[in-house]
Image (cartoon, rainbow, N blue to C red):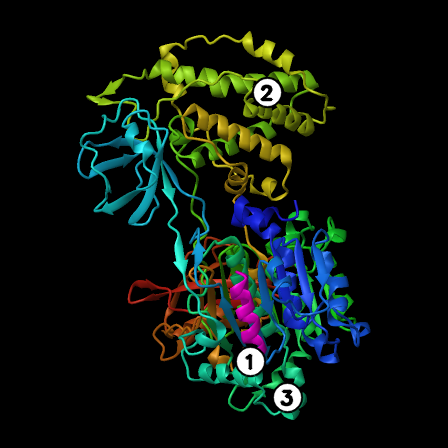
Amino acid sequence: MRHNRTLLAVGQLAHQKIINSHICVLGANPLGAEVIKTFLLFGVNQISIFDNSSVILEDLEANMFITKDSIGENRCEAVKSEIQRLNPNARINILSERPNNESIKKFTLLVVTLQLNFEEICQINELCRQNNVGFAISDVFSFSGFVFIDFGDEFIIENANGRPPEQYRIQAISNANPGIIRFVGKEMPKLPKDSLIRFKDLTSMSELNDFDSINLHYEDGIASLDVDTTNFSKFDRIHPTGFAVQVKKKITLKFLPFKEALDSPFNSIYFTDNHKIVREMFLKRQKGHIDQQNIANQRKQFYLASTTSLIAALVSNECIKYITKNYIPMEKQWFLYNNDDLFDPKTGQTQYEVLEKLKKMNIAIVGVGATGCEAAKLFALHKVNSLTLIDSDSIETTNLNRQVLFSDDDIGKNKAEAAANTIHRFNESIQIHVHQEFVNDETRSTFNDKWFKQFDAIWSMVDSFTGRSYIEKRCAPLGIPSFTGGISKISADWQTLVPNYTPRYTLNEESNDNGTPSCTLKLFPHRPEHCIEWAHHQLNRILQKNDLTDFQSCIDFACKFFIAKFDHKIRDLQFFHPREETNNGALYWSNHRIYPTVIEFDEQNENCKKLINSIVYLLAESNNITKKELDFNQIITYLKQSKWIPPDDSNKSSFEDTENMPHTTLEDLFLHDNEIHIDFIEAASNLRSQNYGLGEIDRLYSQSYAGKIDTAVSTTASICSSSLFIEFLVSIIAPDNLCRGKYLTSPFSYMTFREPMMNKTRFGLSQSEFTPWDYLHYDGTNKTFGEIQKDIEAKANAKLFMWTDENGKLLPVIGKKSFIPLLSSESKFSDFYDAELDSVIIEASLEIHDKIQPEIPPIFISLK
């Protein structure tokens, strides 16, 4: 499904609103084209464009959807033919005139990217307000831009954080004022301190089911209800039922029209006087107070690809908030942007030399996904000398909602190859080299030090933190700047890694989640997520079943699986631990333990049939067995013949042994949207949830959670890559001013900040110091172990205690008893390592005053 990731990111209801919306964009200039691009990638099905101007040469600098052949054509016509490929199902209408009081009523939202005068902007804004149409306007000029939104006098936000309502199983509710509530499980619910909840499916203290919403308050680990439950019926703590469901608080915002909002506070990146000047500059443009001849002379400053992409993504994301009513939009309405290092709004001067230097540079981009595509697009539009694209993945349908260089015709092709082909459509002269491999230790013979040294910068746009860290560690000793960023559906962050100017890359802690404890998964699930994890484990086991020979054996296995997991195993658990069992005076089935119920096969239960169906066809596929149509009458007969036999008490310990549920990782299966895999996860997790009374689990959520799917969207990808690109340009002329940055969708936040370099460290007992960027460089083909050790000890004024290479291999220390007797002080590093390896990084420690001290820079040994 083309927009599956958008659907997972925003939810079914919000996605339907996006599909049903009709957006009007005034302007098919480079900024307007980028805005249209974003809406198409998001899945908007109808867009109307107005722009009666023609394509000019300068448009090519920032618009990937036109070519030299487009010059002189109407902008709308020129853009439409190429941009349509991003969403072939969408309707793109070209308007012959601006919307009037009648025609504007058919639009959900209107975005202005044309350079209109002040009176025209105010007039269109008022027209939108009168007809309940959302309004947004944006403009760019060189490395400067602004966004303004007006969503009316009463804009209601239905879901401030964009997440579905939380739901929790009830363990106990007291008869008191206020009523004290306990939830199943050891953790407190992930809800704000003061929340609204409603109750459902309570069979005891059922009076609470009648409340539309109740205030829930947390204080010192105790959850209380803003209601007097003293005279309510008693809650059955022995047989607890029911759920507390979060009620999303609606937020109402009042926006000012454009004219009135000019004097209101505004958002900005840096709180400097320059942003007041930026606002005045754009107002002068709108009011016609700028010398038109001067504007004509600086026309190429209007649209630079990086600023255009950034401002378009920011305004588009605000528009999506209006359409979906999800997330909090810019409450102050204004966002003003300026990069002071590249553009001076006082004089109107751009640092053109940085753009000229860029044209002589060679850049590599590792990872051509959402952010990698945007980065490659920007380099191509800015006319970089050469671009090398590295990615081993193939394009899938689900990539198309956020990876701008791909279309339906590219499905199945390599990402790097397809991206190169698309780029050559709008920049024929650029040199592009493609590698269809990963960059890691296994491909080091290809991506060796010589390969890295040919580039002026490496862009690491891979998904994992460890992947980014690996590339930075390869670049750092060679003095090569690297740039990296990451995105999610609601945020983006980017980081510049320039030797001797910025901090080193910090390896963020990737999820240390080793899964839910096995005892919880196997015996005591109490959250829907536990059921999904359990289904994930079961899928792994099914896929490893490769000894079946015919279709009937697949059916037999599926039937036995159903009977065992949802019927007999549950009866076993009930047998070993009866409902009224106590342990040291306390009920065994209490707190996080939920007494389960048996599920028998029910032909009317879609999950029962879906489970059998998915298992049979998964097994047939993995065992290369010809598939046939299932006869459920035969299956029902088979299932009815199975009888539960009470287990022997001696089997109790083995039944409760939970060590046989290893943590599994099958996330890649769900990235490919294989319907059979998703069918199994949905059916198995729902049947498991039915066993334990945990409620229905949404198919989309089960897919997303089981696959740990990154639900990134096109707007955050553009924000990340364009912001990083601007910092890259700053690194060329003003590296002392480099910033890292972060964008957050709700509440709106765009931050850039400078990070100080880490303090220098004293080198052993010497008077010299080193920074995290410093390395000791040695030629391992000429110098021996003894010579290098002696040189290090002289520089540190201390004895070497131990050194190991980056893979943990221990190296001999001359003068100490060697663990490697075949090596001597005369041995060379190049004799110690594989001939294909061109360098190695050594970590060492010193012996100072009988203590081991790691106060020494990494040692870079070249082996060729």
> Residue drawn at (33%, 28%), measured in percent from left and top?
202
Could you classify mark 2 by the number of other residues whose Cα lies within 10 Å: few (under 14), some (14-19), or many (20 or more)? many
| Residue 774 seen anywhere in this rendered image of the structure | no
* Mark 2, residue position: 558
Circle 1: element type? helix
Q: CA distance from mark 2 to mark 3?
A: 73 Å
User: Is 340 within the magenta?
Assistant: no
Q: Nearer the viewer, residue 153 or 668?
A: 153
* Mark 3, residue position: 295
Q: CA distance from mark 2 to mark 1?
A: 69 Å
* Mark 1, residue position: 118
Q: Nearer the viewer, residue 39 or 417?
A: 39
Could you tell me residue 719's position as x and y percent?
55, 65
> Residue drawn at (26%, 24%), measured in percent from left and top?
236
Mark positioned earlier in the residue sequence (3 or 1):
1
Circle 3: element type? helix
Question: Of discs 2 and 3, which sits in the foreground?
Answer: 3
Q: Of the residues shown, which amino acid type is indicated by label 2?
A: Ala
Mark positioned earlier in the residue sequence (2 or 1):
1
Q: Is residue 293 above or below residue 32?
A: below
Could you tell me residue 377's position as x and y percent?
67, 67
Q: Is residue 630 above or below residue 74?
A: above
Q: Over which residues does the magenta segment extend? A: 118-137
